[in-house]
Image (cartoon, rainbow, N blue to C red):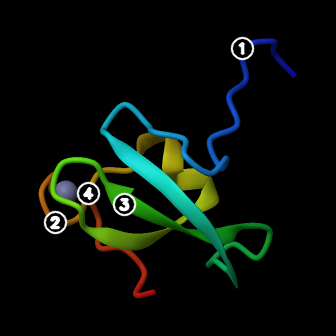
Amino acid sequence: MGSQSVVTTAIGFKNRKGQVVVRNTGHRGVDLSQYIYQLACGKCGHNYGANGSDIYERKCPACQDGEPGFVL
Ligand SMILES: [Zn+2]
């Protein structure tokens, strides 16, 4: 546990690619210990689902050539 830890699943968190956490969808992701979060792209406005563990490095599937998101 480092003092530098950031809560990347907090609502409103924006990663360095400009992807913003909108909400926890409450759905379990591929990894059952993870929830799927709704993210919104700060550049094009695209909304998509992503695993909580992927938020930190997530890129927009619409405008940043990221992996396809989960359908919400
Ligand atoms: Zn985008």
Q: Earlier in the sequence, mark 2 or mark 1?
A: 1
Choose between 15 and 66: the one closer to the eye: 15
Pointer 1: what residue? Answer: 4
Q: Position of residue 37 (x, y in %)?
A: 57, 67
Q: Quadrant of residue 3?
A: top right
Mark nearer the viewer, 4 or 3: 3
Residue farthest toward the top in the current orientation of the protein: 3
Pointer 2: what residue? Answer: 62
- Whether the residues at callouts 4 and 2 have beta carbons within 8 Å, the answer is yes
Q: Position of residue 59 (x, y in %)?
A: 30, 50
Mark nearer the viewer, 1 or 3: 3
Asked if ligand 1 lies within 8 A of label 2, the reply is: yes
Quadrant location of the N terminus?
top right
Give the spatial CA distance, label 3 vs label 2. 11 Å
- Whether the residues at callouts 4 and 1 have beta carbons within 8 Å, the answer is no
Give the spatial CA distance, label 1 vs label 3. 25 Å
| Helix, strand or loop status at disc 2 | loop
Pointer 4: what residue? Answer: 60
Residue sitting at x 72%, y 14%: 4
| Helix, strand or loop status at disc 3 | strand
Residue farthest toward the right in the current orientation of the protein: 1
Pointer 3: what residue? Answer: 40
Q: Position of residue 54 (x, y in %)?
A: 52, 53
In terms of image quarters, where does ligand 1 lie?
bottom left
| Helix, strand or loop status at disc 4 | loop
Q: Quadrant of residue 17?
A: top left
Give the spatial CA distance, label 4 vs label 1. 25 Å
| Helix, strand or loop status at disc 1 | loop
